Image: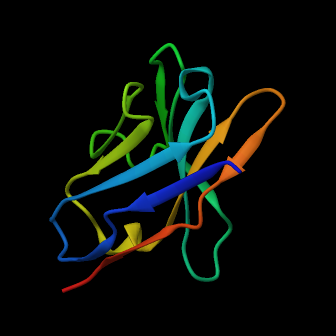
Amino acid sequence: QVQLVESGGGLVQPGGSLRLSCAASRIIFNTYTMGWYRQAPGNERELVAIATPGGTTNYADSVKGRFTISRDNAKNTVYLQMNSLKPEDTAMYYCTAKTVYMNYWGKGTLVTVSS
């Protein structure tokens, strides 16, 4: 069974940094577009960043210049480096693995930005 396991969430002060990781198993990792979504309480789930198999990346406007997505195909892992965190970044962050035919989600890791 495909598994996406996120880690690295936690409580951080405004202006701080966190690095999220997502380890994938039982997929041909280098054929999937990997991504991060987030959902804050009372809000819809929104795209944060994606990284295609070829290495192209795309970001939500709200995180451009602060967040960086990267992938290590040898380790079947995708990362989200989050810098200059703001209280409005507080959300559950979900890892995704997508192709044209398949779409998998992790269970999420909670990020709380608060002083």
Vertically, is 8 above or below 20?
Answer: below
Residue, x 36% and y 51% (percent of image)? 21
Q: Is residue 83 left or right of residue 33?
A: left
Give the vertical position of 74 relative to 69 (above or below): above
Q: Position of residue 33 (x, y in %)?
A: 60, 29
**Front position in the image: 61 or 33:** 33
Residue sitting at 50 percent across and 58 percent down? 5
Residue 100, percent from left and from top: 80, 26
Q: Is residue 80 left or right of residue 109?
A: left
For the rendered model, the colour scheme is: rainbow
- Say which of 81 and 65 sits in front: 81
Residue 3 is left or right of residue 1, and the answer is left
User: What x and y, as percent, mark residue 82?
Assistant: 28, 53
Tell me the quadrant of the picture where the C terminus can be found.
bottom left
In the displayed structure, 66 sits above or below 106; it is: above
Using the rendered image of the protein, determine whether residue 62 is visible from the camera's viewpoint.
no
The image shows a total of numbered marks equal to: 0
**Residue at 28% of width from left, 39% of height from top?**
65
Classify residue 38 by image quadrant.
bottom right
Can residue 57 be seen here? The reply is yes
58 or 25: nearer the viewer: 25
Of all residues, the one furthest to the right in this rendering is 101
Left or right of 110, for residue 18 = left
Taking the spot 54% from the left edge, 23% from the top edge, the residue there is 52
Residue most extreme to the top: 54
